[in-house]
Amino acid sequence: MSTLILAAQAAQGGGGMGGMLIMMVVIFAIMWFFMIRPQQKKQKKIREFQNSLQEGSKVVTGGGIYGTVKRLDAATNTVDVEIARGVVISVDKSYVFADVSQQQPNA
C-alpha cells in the first residue's frame, strides 16, 4: 500500500515542473501585455513626434523647459528652441518629448 502512495507522489512530483514552466510562461505573457507592450507603443509615438517636428512647433524638453522650435539641424540632430523672447537654446532632438498644443485642454 505504501509503495502505491510513493509511486503516486513520484508521478505528481514530475508533473510539477511542467506546471511550474507553464505558470512562468503565463506570468511573462501577462507582464508583456500590461507592461512591455504599452511602453513600446509609447516610445514609438514619441519617436514619430520627434521625426515630425517642424519650425514653430511648441514643445517640452526632457528637462521640463517649454518653448518653440526655431530651427532643426539634421546634420547634428539638434533642435534650437526659443524659451523666451530672444533666448534660444540648442537641444538634442531625442530630448524633445511632447507637443504642448496637444496637451492643453480647449478652454
Image (cartoon, rainbow, N blue to C red):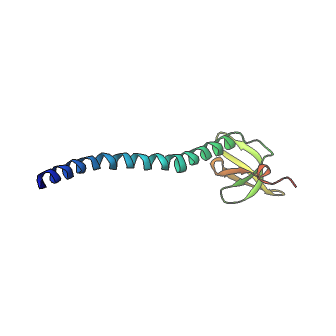
Q: Is residue 74 left or right of residue 22?
A: right
* Location of residue 3 in the rendering, given as x and y in whole percent from the top left corner: 11, 52
Residue most extreme to the front: 1
Residue at (66% x, 47% y) in the render: 93
* Location of residue 72 in the rendering, given as x and y in whole percent from the top left corner: 72, 43
User: In the figure, 74 relative to 1: above or below?
Assistant: above
* Location of residue 64 in the rendering, given as x and y in whole percent from the top left corner: 69, 60
Residue at (24% x, 49% y) in the render: 12
Q: How many marks?
A: 0
Residue at (78% x, 46% y) in the render: 57
* Any part of residue 76 in sight: no
Looking at this view, is 47 or 19 the one in front? 19
Q: Is residue 23 left or right of residue 35?
A: left
Q: Is residue 72 left or right of residue 10?
A: right
* Location of residue 6 in the rendering, given as x and y in whole percent from the top left corner: 15, 53
Looking at this view, is 15 or 24 the one in front? 15
Residue at (16% x, 49% y) in the render: 7
Quarter of the image with the C terminus is bottom right
Q: Is residue 74 left or right of residue 13?
A: right
Looking at this view, is 88 or 57 the one in front? 57
Residue most extreme to the right: 107
* Any part of residue 65 in sight: yes
